[in-house]
Image (cartoon, rainbow, N blue to C red):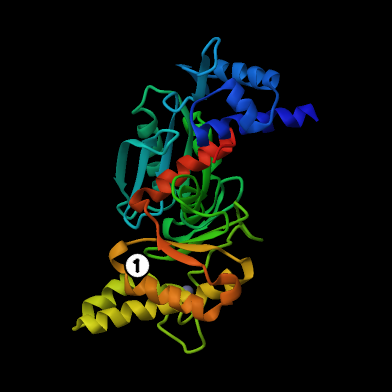
């Protein structure tokens, strides 16, 4: 049906250019399987919207007129990416289609919750949007807590938010397209778009809390109540453990949250003891992840958080435990690695979300 084919073909053209870079209309037709006529038509439309740009010609071995190259207009737009998951600050950046950061702003949270925290987000987004004269494709926001598909924060206890229609409120305030999603899901998107994530992957974010984003068949999993990946308050093992803020004992967070790990490491007196603390945390992570890896047949686990804690004994113990507890036949080549995207992962993922939501590009 042509009415459905057109948006699909537009995304296909943009995705092909985004992934492969500048090419001629003839190459684009070959790469997408669309006809030359359809490609010329779509490229003309995208040129009109400044989403695609002509980039001179390429000398060809063949005789005749050299082909004009077209590319997605990488420098023609900016994206605002915002990370609300920080313990004591919100941060945001102005990025381009390739995830390059042009400008960044950090706003101390100063204990703000509820409307005061909302005002800080709005001011931050407005400040970032005012820092560029290039048109803005959209604003992406990674929020802690449970966020539904309409960008409403159903619950974010640390910020005192409940049923807050953040996406709708920001869009009305800014007059720009806005997309809001859970920070771990957004980080998973960053790994997929700008990192090296495979299509069946899990990204575990370890900070003040522990959360995860799940990518299955290249698609994010949301779950029954939009809380897929909320593994932080799942109890690991049957041998108790430290009390958790949620009222249970031995939640994954009690083993892995960075404040708890730092406190244990600070109290240790020898290197052997410190190594053992990190190994025990990694082992619990492996125990918690093994059934997930098995049930979903994941190819990899990506860890995002402080490298000085995660890299080394913790990651090694987690992978050893995962391997020992899953079927070597199916999961023997499972990989576990740290994300290379560092502290910008949520801001870059928020930009990836805007690219995907507005242009169908990932
Ligand atoms: Zn808990």
Work out whether residue 88 or residue 61 is closer to the camera in this orientation and state it.
Answer: 61
**Residue at x 43% of width, y 55% of height:** 159
Q: Position of residue 213 (x, y in %)?
A: 52, 58
Is residue 338 visible in this depiction of the protein? yes
Up-down relation of residue 309 to residue 40 (above or below): below
Work out whether residue 272 or residue 24 is closer to the camera in this orientation and state it.
Answer: 24
Up-down relation of residue 106 to residue 234 (above or below): above
Left or right for 293, reference 206 = right
Up-down relation of residue 23 to residue 271 (above or below): above
Q: Position of residue 133 (x, y in %)?
A: 37, 22
Work out whether residue 242 or residue 255 is closer to the camera in this orientation and state it.
Answer: 255
Q: Which residue is mark 1?
A: 310
**Residue at x 36% of width, y 54% of height:** 86
Q: Callout 1: helix, strand or loop?
A: helix
Left or right for 252, reference 40 = left
Left or right for 102, reference 226 = left
Q: Position of residue 192 (x, y in %)?
A: 50, 49
Up-down relation of residue 196 to residue 245 (above or below): above
Is residue 247 visible in this depiction of the protein? no
How many marks are shown on the rendered structure?
A: 1
**Residue at x 36% of width, y 73% of height:** 314
């Amino acid at each position: 049906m042509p009415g459905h084919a057109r948006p699909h073909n537009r995304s296909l053209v943009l995705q092909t250019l985004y992934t492969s870079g500048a090419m001629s209309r003839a190459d684009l037709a070959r790469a997408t399987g669309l006809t030359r006529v359809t490609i010329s038509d779509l490229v003309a439309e995208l040129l009109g919207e400044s989403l695609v740009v002509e980039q001179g010609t390429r000398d060809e071995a063949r005789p005749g007129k050299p082909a004009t190259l077209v590319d997605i207009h990488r420098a023609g737009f900016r994206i605002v990416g915002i990370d609300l998951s920080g313990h004591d600050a919100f941060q945001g950046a102005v990025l381009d289609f390739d995830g390059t950061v042009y400008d960044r702003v950090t706003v101390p949270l100063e204990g703000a919750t509820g409307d005061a925290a909302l005002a800080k987000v709005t001011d931050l987004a407005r400040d970032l949007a005012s820092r560029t004269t290039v048109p803005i494709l959209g604003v992406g926001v990674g929020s802690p807590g449970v966020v539904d598909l309409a960008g409403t924060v159903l619950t974010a206890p640390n910020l005192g938010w409940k049923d807050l229609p953040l996406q709708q409120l920001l869009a009305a305030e800014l007059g720009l397209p806005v997309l809001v999603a859970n920070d771990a899901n957004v980080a998973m998107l960053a790994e997929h778009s700008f990192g090296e994530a495979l299509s069946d992957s899990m990204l575990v974010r370890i900070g003040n809390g522990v959360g995860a984003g799940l990518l299955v068949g290249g698609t994010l999993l949301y779950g029954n109540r939009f809380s897929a990946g909320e593994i932080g308050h799942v109890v690991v093992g049957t041998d108790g453990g430290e009390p958790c803020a949620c009222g249970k004992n031995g939640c994954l967070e009690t083993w892995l949250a960075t404040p708890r790990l730092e406190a244990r490491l600070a109290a240790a007196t020898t290197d052997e003891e410190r190594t053992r603390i990190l190994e025990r945390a990694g082992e619990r992570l492996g125990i918690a992840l093994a059934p997930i890896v098995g049930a979903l047949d994941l190819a990899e686990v990506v860890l995002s958080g402080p490298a000085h804690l995660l890299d080394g004994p913790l990651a090694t113990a987690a992978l050893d435990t995962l391997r020992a507890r899953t079927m070597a036949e199916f999961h023997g080549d499972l990989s576990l690695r740290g994300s290379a995207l560092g502290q910008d992962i949520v801001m870059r993922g928020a930009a990836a979300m805007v690219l995907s939501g507005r242009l169908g590009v990932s």
